[in-house]
Image: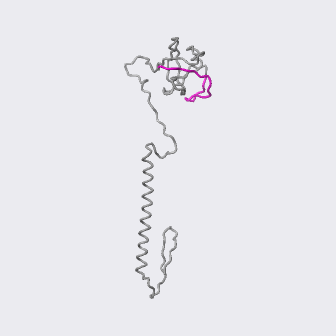
């Protein structure tokens, strides 16, 4: 009769042994079965490929940020528009008002430089590093110009963290916080 064996190229090969003439199975019948089997296997293979391709496209459609780097988080940068200075603007603009706090400890700032509590520096969530910022204590009228070199504050409701030296100049060391007005100087 015939036997089916697996060939090296992952194809199926059917060997037809010599069939005696008295047999009820004709060569034409075997050929028809073989052709039908090939058609069914080809159709199954194409269906598997199509299903795999459509499921991959569907998973990419669900996540609009998907890319080749799907395991990482996508970060987005937001431009802080109140600090954009028009051409005919005065030298300083009011950046914001809110509560300021100060910090005295830290190894390294977000800008990469070592934190020094004696420098007049500040942490702001969005202003570019190096921005000069005039911080004015609303209650006392005292002000100090600081340089943004870190990110923060990470406490809700606060607009800036200043170094110990800046807090001392503002007269807020005792209370720890103060209502301030921020002006971008440079």
The vertical placement of 26 against 35, above or below, is: below
Q: Nearer the viewer, residue 4 or 129?
A: 4
Across and down, in percent, residue 179 comes to 51, 17
Asked if the stretch drawn in magenta spans residue 51, the answer is no
Q: Position of residue 185 (x, y in %)?
A: 47, 19
Q: What colour scheme was applied to this rendering of the protein? A: one colour
The answer to whether residue 30 is above or below residue 50 is below
- What is the residue that sits farthest to the bottom in this orientation? 22
Residue occupying image coordinates x 41% and y 65%: 43
Instruction: Report the number of discs.
Output: 0
Residue occupying image coordinates x 44% and y 64%: 44
Which secondary structure type mostly characterizes the magenta part of the structure? loop
Q: Residue at x 58, y 18 (%)?
A: 176
Extreme-top residue of the structure: 140
Decide if residue 139 is on the left or right side of residue 42. right
Q: Is residue 107 left or right of residue 90?
A: right
40, 66: nearer the viewer: 40
Which residues lie in the magenta part? 97-116
- Return the x and y of residue 119 as percentages of the image width and height: 58, 20
Q: Is residue 113 magenta?
A: yes
| 182 up-or-down from 33: above or below | above
Q: Position of residue 2 (x, y in %)?
A: 49, 79
Farthest residue, direction left: 88
* Residue beneath the point at 42% across and 68% down: 40
């Amino acid at each position: 009769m015939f036997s089916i064996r697996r060939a090296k190229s992952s194809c199926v090969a059917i060997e037809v042994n010599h069939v005696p003439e008295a047999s009820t199975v004709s060569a034409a019948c075997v050929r028809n079965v073989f052709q039908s089997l090939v058609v069914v296997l080809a159709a199954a293979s194409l269906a598997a490929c199509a299903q795999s391709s459509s499921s991959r496209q569907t998973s990419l459609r669900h996540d609009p940020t998907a890319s080749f780097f799907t395991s990482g988080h996508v970060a987005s940068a937001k431009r802080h528009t109140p600090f954009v200075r028009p051409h005919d603007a005065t030298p300083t603009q009011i950046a914001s008002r809110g509560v300021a706090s100060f910090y005295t400890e830290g190894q390294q700032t977000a800008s990469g430089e070592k934190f020094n509590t004696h420098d007049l520096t500040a942490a702001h969530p969005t202003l570019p590093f190096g921005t000069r910022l005039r911080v004015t204590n609303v209650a006392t009228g005292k002000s100090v110009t600081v340089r943004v070199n870190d990110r923060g504050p990470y406490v809700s409701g606060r607009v800036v963290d200043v170094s110990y030296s800046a807090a001392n100049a503002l007269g807020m060391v005792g209370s720890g916080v103060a209502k301030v007005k921020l002006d971008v100087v440079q």
